[in-house]
Amino acid sequence: MTVGVATYLAWAVVIVVLAMIFPILLIIGILDRKNGYRRLKGFAFWFIEWFFLGYLPLTRLYKLVETPSKEQACANQPCIYVANHRSGLDAILAFAYFPKIRIPVKKTYLDLPLLGLIIRWIGCISFDRKDPQSIIDGVKQAEEILAAGESLFVFPEGTRSGSDGTSMFSDVFFRVALNANVPVVPVIIHSDVPFLAPEGKSILTRRRAAWRIIVEEPLRRDKRDRPSDLSRSARRVISKKLASLATSKG
C-alpha cells in the first residue's frame, strides 16, 4: 500500500468514527453542563493521542523516531516551551506528548467546522495578531495559566515556515516568561520530508516521514536579559539543531 492510499484510508476511517461519536458528545455537553466540558476535553486529548500517535503511524503514513522522555515532557514547574513551526501536525504532536500545556492559536481557527470546537475543548488561547486588545487579553490569560501551574507551548514564528531554517521569533511570550519568572525550553519538531507544510503537495508524502521531537535544556538567564535576548537565544538553539538534522539527512 502506498503512503498516499494509506492517507486516504486513514482519514476516511476517522471521519466515519467522528460522524458517529460527535453527536453523542455534543448531547453529553448539553445535558451535563457541570461535567460535560471536562468529558469533552478528555475525549479530545484521548482522540489526539489515539489517532496521531497510534493509528496514523500504523498506516505507515509516518513514524516517530525520536520523542521526549516523560521527565522532559512533564516539567516539574510551569515553563514556556518554544518550538519551530513547519507543519500542521506540530501542535497536535505537542498536545500528544506534553501534558498540562496550553497553546496560543490564531483566532480564525475557532471558526473552522469541528476543529474550532476541539480547539475550545482543549483550552487553547486565541489570538488575533491584528487586534491589540486581543493580544493584551491573550497575554493576561497566559500569565494566569502559568500562575495556575500549567505550561505554555508556543510557536513564536507565528505561522508555518517554508524553509529549513526559522523565521523571526516574536518577543511576546519571552516577555511573559520574564514577567512570570518561568524557564524557557527550546523544542525542535522535525520531519525529514515536508508534511502538511506550506510547500505544495505535502499532504501526501512520497515516502514515510520520520518525525523527531527534541527537547533542549532550558535557556540560561540573568537579570539583564530582555525579551529580545531570550528570543534570539531560543532561535539560535533551534536553528542550530535544525541545520544539524538537515545535514545528517543529506
Image: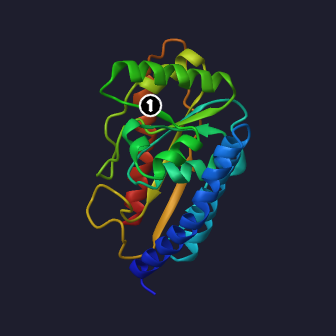
> Which residue appears farthest toward the left when viewing the image?
200
**Looking at the rendering, which quadrant does residue 51 occupy?**
bottom right
Q: Position of residue 181 (x, y in %)?
A: 60, 18
Q: Is residue 135 above or below residue 103?
A: above
Q: Is residue 3 above or below residue 44?
A: below
Going 37% across and 33% down the picture, which residue do you hit?
A: 169
**Looking at the rendering, which quadrant does residue 106 occupy?**
top left
Q: Is residue 197 above or below residue 16?
A: above
Q: Secondary structure at mark 1?
A: helix
Q: Position of residue 59 (x, y in %)?
A: 53, 77
- Dot 1: few (<14), some (14–19), or many (≥20) neighbours within 10 Å? some
Between residue 9 and residue 34, name the one nearer to us: 34
Between residue 86 and residue 123, name the one nearer to us: 123
- Numbered circles on residues, count: 1
Between residue 52 and residue 112, name the one nearer to us: 112
Q: Position of residue 196 (x, y in %)?
A: 37, 60
Q: Is residue 2 above or below residue 172?
A: below
Tag 1: amino acid: Ser
Residue on which the image places disc 1: 233
> Which residue appears farthest toward the top when viewing the image?
224
Q: Specify the quadrant that holds the C terminus.
A: bottom left
Going 36% across and 66% down the picture, which residue do you hit?
A: 203
Is residue 72 something one can see in this rendering? no
Between residue 160 and residue 133, name the one nearer to us: 133
Is residue 77 something one can see in this rendering? yes
Q: How is the image coloured?
A: rainbow
> In screen coordinates, is 10 left or right of 232?
right
> Which residue appears farthest toward the front when viewing the image?
31
**Looking at the rendering, which quadrant does residue 77 occupy?**
top right
